[in-house]
Amino acid sequence: MLERVKNADLHSKIMTAEESASFFENNMIVGSSGFTRGGDSKVVLKALAERAKNEELKITLITGASLGHGTDAALVESKALHKRLPFQVDSVMRKSINNGEVLFIDQHLGESAEHILNNQFKLDIGVLEATEILEDGSLVFTTSIGNNVEIARNADKLIIEINTSIPTNIRGVHDIYNVEGYGKRTPINITACDTKIGSDTIKVDPSKIVGIVFHDIQDMPGDIQPADDATAAIARNIVKFFEKEVKKGRLTKSLMPLQCGIGKVANAVLGGLENSDFENLVMYSEVLQDSTFDLLDSGKMKFASASSMTVSQECYDRVINNIDKYKDKIVLRPQAISNSAEVIRRLGIIGINTSLECDIYGNVNSTHVSGTHMMNGIGGSGDFARNAYMSIFVTSSIAKGGNISSIVPMVSHTDHTEHDVDIIVTEQGLADLRGLAPRERAIEIINNCVHEDYKGELLSYFERACSQRGGQTPHILEEAFSWHTRLRETGSMKKQKVLA
């Protein structure tokens, strides 16, 4: 273990996770590594949760994104959590958020570092996972960076989890860059996906390190679901669209740098590219998934940049056990860089993200079920949608066995306005909204993306809104949410048949 802590003065700080939990006090603000299960705190926060079972101990927790290994659930169940930000995916936490027991701040991931940087949240303790600590106190991170840079530099105290399951030769995968404060900020000089502008470690003041805890726990595997008929059809629709864009001269066979949200649809879309005629692809995204490494291994993709990797167990073993093979093909960056509006706009990203529902004018709800109940969070989709060369949102046209239409008259919660949405794709087809006025967008979406069970009623709503109310964006306000009301009252958005 001591080989992983090369600064001999820090050997006295090695302790158990239970001992490290003693540093936490009630009402502290805590920052932790972890971005979509990658590189997260695996033992210290759980030890904190155990301690909180027996005393009044609540914290505000800031991470990069979601955590793995049930850590969020453990904190909730022990009532150790007062407030959480900026993203989560845990079902236990989701229930507590929607019950009002845990306060949740849903943030653009590209902006969450600003709250630390500007002392809107003054961190008392930071918990960071690393592979080793070097002689000068520098940290070598593991499978994510997230908000680690801001946490390391701004927390009053640091507890380091040394993960011995990660080989030390992962060093070199990371590109650590510090974003300056407002008024002093210089350009982020990334001009291509493979541009590196920082260092492969981050130097911290060794005196801030109050505890070092060892473990050998791997990242929790990503929940990689195989493509179903709907997601496979969505992938085909996107690939066909890209092929048309190449024929029109708006894209080349290398497309533009790709960004894909996490999950089944994203993996299906990227998987669809593996069997296409596209070549020399590059990625500038938040998370490296199985499909990313499949594209790299096949030679279809030549480089991928992100803030984290979240993959299946098979892919994790393939990458971690052969990390030297991938060092010239991938880079992990702070999320302040991976999700930077400046870099996204400069590189001309094609952003592909998922939605819960879209409306007939192209507004997108990514976060709230029926407008009130949080699902996971906006994540980085807004960072890319607002600044991308092409902003694509995908969803199945129906959900819950057809009782829900994912295309509705008006979204029940707006995360992305029509101004930031270029393309909407379902398994039914694709609506290219670029250059269209609102009334044109409605026709394009209804004709191409809506399931047959709902198309007639949605077209009727639009036509009546135009004739009865008019306006730039026609709506019948007293009917706009009638589909959601019907769902709540009957369990389905479908109109009930009236018996003679």
Image (cartoon, helix red, strand yellow):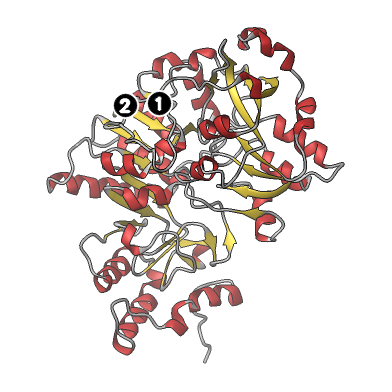
Viewer-proximal residue, 199 or 206?
206
Viewer-proximal residue, 472 or 247?
472
Per the image, the residue denoted by label 2 is 194
Residue 4, compared with residue 205, is above or below; it is above
Q: Is residue 73 left or right of residue 33?
A: right
Residue name at image x 41 percent, y 73 percent: 409
Q: Which mark, by number, is residue 28?
A: none
First along the sequence among labels 2 and 1? 2
Could you say whether the residue bearing mark 2 is in a helix, strand or loop? loop
Q: Which residue is farthest right? A: 54
Q: Position of residue 373 (x, y in %)?
A: 59, 62
Q: Position of residue 458 (x, y in %)?
A: 37, 75
Q: Position of residue 394 (x, y in %)?
A: 38, 54
Q: Position of residue 113 (x, y in %)?
A: 50, 41
Residue name at image x 73 percent, y 43 percent: 75
Could you say whether the residue bearing mark 1 is in a helix, strand or loop? strand
Q: Is residue 429 left or right of residue 220?
A: left
Per the image, the residue denoted by label 1 is 331
Q: Which residue is farthest bottom? A: 500
Q: Amino acid at mark 1?
A: Val
Q: Dots 2 and 1: beta carbons under 8 Å? A: yes
Are there few (<14), some (14-19), or many (20+) residues within 10 Å of tag 2? some
